[in-house]
Amino acid sequence: MHTGQRIIQLRLQKNWTQKELAKRVHINVSVMNRIESGDRPIKDSELIAIADILKVTTDYLLGRAEAPECRETKQENEFVKRIQKKNPAAEAMLRDMATLTPEEMQDVYDYLLFKKSRRKD
């Protein structure tokens, strides 16, 4: 199974269209199509972004690991703990976010990026 086939398999497990994954990776859907079909080599930055979004290792996508070794458990636990430390109501917020549609989650993410870009650090 080549990289594109692994991406397709993981994308379908999440019930995402090619367009949804392309949007999350911030690439054109035609580029995603060519990556998945094996007609275009995948750039390192794209590979890393896709692995992060699909919550697998780059080694799995490249065929160097047999199991997709889900990375979310430890990373997400630490992430949730950091958020909860900053905001006690975070658990309720995250629970509410889990009920959103993929489009609504993308809207929330877009808003977060906007707010982050306007922040003066």
Image: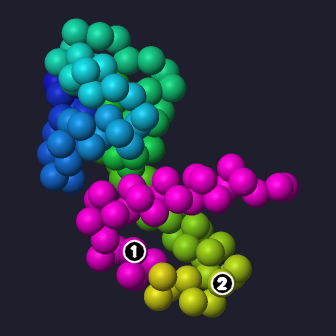
Q: Quadrant of residue 34?
A: top left
State the residue in front, 78 or 18. 18
In screen coordinates, is 70 left or right of 45?
left
In screen coordinates, is 99 left or right of 71?
left
Q: In which quarter of the image is residue 28?
A: top left
Identified at 47% across, 88% down, the residue is 92
Identified at 26% across, 65% down, the residue is 101
- For the question of whether residue 119 can be seen, the reply is yes
Q: Is mark 1 on a helix, strand or loop?
A: helix
Q: Considering the whole magenta stretch, tell me its main secondary structure.
A: helix
Does the segment drawn in magenta span residue 41?
Answer: no
Give the residue at mark 1. 97
State the residue in front, 25 or 118. 118
Q: Is mark 2 on a helix, strand or loop?
A: loop
Position above or below: 14 against 49: below
Position above or below: 13 against 94: above
Position above or below: 42 against 70: above
In screen coordinates, is 36 left or right of 70?
left
Residue stretch in magenta:
94-121
Give the residue at mark 2. 87
